[in-house]
Amino acid sequence: MRDTRAMASTPADVKELPSAYEFVLDIPGLKYDDIKVQIEDENLLVITGERRRDDEKDKEDGKYNRIERWMGKFMRKFTLPDNANLDFITVVCRDGVLTVALEKLPLPEQKKPKTIEVKIA
Amino acid sequence: MRDTRAMASTPADVKELPSAYEFVLDIPGLKYDDIKVQIEDENLLVITGERRRDDEKDKEDGKYNRIERWMGKFMRKFTLPDNANLDFITVVCRDGVLTVALEKLPLPEQKKPKTIEVKIA
């Protein structure tokens, strides 16, 4: 699962469960509507969003004595495993944490190894 | 406003408004109950909390392919300005962002400079 970073980034965990893959991102201050989750090229999960200081109106009155929280656009890309089911994606955004889950496709039934009878001449 | 870091940290902005000081911290995944806001030594704002992966139950079944999100206890300390009113503190926790605001005390009335009449002899 290769991850290509561009623009600003935000930390992510990637978890594999028996039945699904989970991508968990910290997005403090963002809501569901601020986030875009897309599949590109059949196997690339792309998560983008933008974080703005919600105090444009305060700019005239207030001043920052310290700024550490990152703002701006961010993007994270994850190459999905072959067995990720692109038809079953759930997106949950809660308390500044985004969780994108993709169900796993059932594995193709494995062919049983063929037993070749060996006759001893 | 000196800031003493200990344990893990989390980014913070400090903003001065005409009537208040605002301390804004990223705390993705945490709720109001996970955070403790205290005043120590009359002028030290201490914000502590602990972030845990909420999947203790998954540990047996799931495995992490990538871990970037920080977990554990954190603490941030801020020395408050003299005119911060410790009796008017508001704490708001929303979408993984904590905002602690302290009203400013009114400035003591400034004495007008005394005009000394100078008589020319």
Image (cartoon, coloured by chain):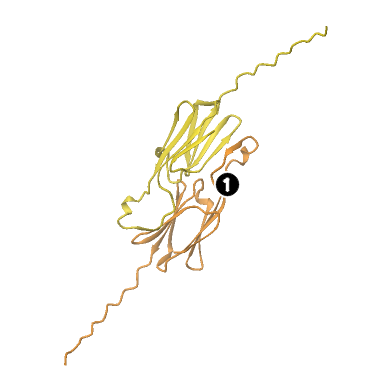
Chain colours: A yellow, B orange
* The N terminus of chain A - image quarter: top right
Q: Give the tally of numbered discs.
A: 1
Q: What residue is at 44 percent from the left and 53 percent from the top?
A: A68
Say whether residue B111 is left or right of residue A69. Answer: left
The residue at the point 26 percent across, 81 percent down is: B114
List x then y, in percent, for residue A49: 41, 39
Q: Position of residue A43 (x, y in %)?
A: 49, 27
Front-most of A83 and B114?
Answer: A83
Furthest residue toward front: A121
Residue A64: percent from left, percent from top? 38, 57
Indicate whether B96 appears above or below A65: above
Q: Residue furthest right?
A: A121
| In this rendering, position of residue B79 left or right of residue B62 | left
Query: Identity of the amino acid at label 1?
Result: Arg
Q: Residue furthest bottom?
A: B121
In this rendering, is residue A69 above or below B21? above
Quadrant containing the C terminus of chain A in the rendered view: top right
Q: Looking at this rendering, what residue extends furthest in the top direction?
A: A121
For label 1, the residue is B52
Residue B102 at x, y = what percent? Answer: 41, 61
Please tell me which residue is depicted at 52% across the width and 34% down the height of the picture: A2
